[in-house]
Amino acid sequence: SQQGEEDPQALSIQEGENATMNCSYKTSINNLQWYRQNSGRGLVHLILIRSNEREKHSGRLRVTLDTSKKSSSLLITASRAADTASYFCATDKGGAQKLVFGQGTRLTINP
Amino acid sequence: GAGVSQSPSNKVTEKGKDVELRCDPISGHTALYWYRQSLGQGLEFLIYFQGNSAPDKSGLPSDRFSAERTGGSVSTLTIQRTQQEDSAVYLCASSQHPPETQYFGPGTRLLVL
């Protein structure tokens, strides 16, 4: 089974609203990352949060990490139509050299 | 420098044929990964190369799949005797400090008829 599981699988909101996506994982991690994918092609790294961090910001992105609950959330504030994409969380599964990706959340921003 | 590049962008082949997919990682990145993504699904790890170490092949779905990385740079993923279920987007990524940020190529969309 996937180390990371995103929730919801799909999210549709109006432009200007905030979008929140969640990720749960099963084993201990050193860091958790969020990636974005447009049109089923290459992924773009958004943000990395380490296991000793609780919150991190990057522009309109805010990521939280709760290691006790083994969960993370990605918040996109003031959403734009260009934010429409799939968002994936990825974990290193206890320091392993490879990342394990979840199934992703498909975000649609309606103009 | 340039990002990760992959070729071809699209590949259509007949069932039973062999295909080769190429990945050029970012110069200086020691780690290289191959993933497979079926339509509407997440990424499935296939294989990982790190420097001169033996590759982690734990994700290869069958012995029809193989990959090599020559000179610590370019990698080729080979699928022999392709099957229709091999149809997917094959993504390559490289990293300087695994398992941190991975930089992805645009992918190769493979269609097996």
Image (cartoon, coloured by chain):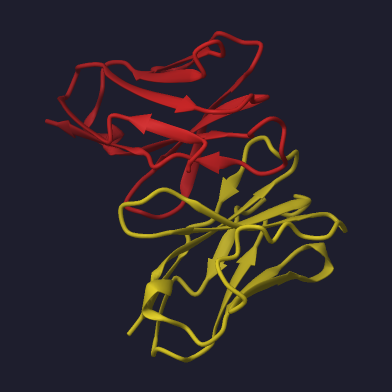
Q: Is residue A55 above or below residue B47?
A: above
Residue A12 horizontal/vertical position (percent):
17, 30
Residue B45 horizontal/vertical position (percent):
56, 54
- Judging depth in this view, the residue of A72 and A12 nearest the camera is A72
The residue sitting at 49% across, 13% down in the picture is A69
- Judging depth in this view, the residue of A47 and A65 nearest the camera is A65
Q: Is residue A14 above or below residue B108?
A: above
Chain that appears red: A
The residue sitting at 16% across, 25% down in the picture is A13
Task: Tell me: A64 left or right of A20.
Answer: right
Task: Tell me: B36 left or right of A40.
Answer: right
The residue sitting at 38% across, 32% down in the picture is A6
Count the labels in the image: 0
Q: Could you say which quadrant of the image residue A85 lies in?
A: top left
What colour is chain B? Answer: yellow
* The C terminus of chain B sits in image quarter: bottom left
Task: Tell me: B75 left or right of A75.
Answer: right
The residue sitting at 17% across, 24% down in the picture is A15
Residue A81 horizontal/vertical position (percent):
22, 33
Residue A14 horizontal/vertical position (percent):
13, 24
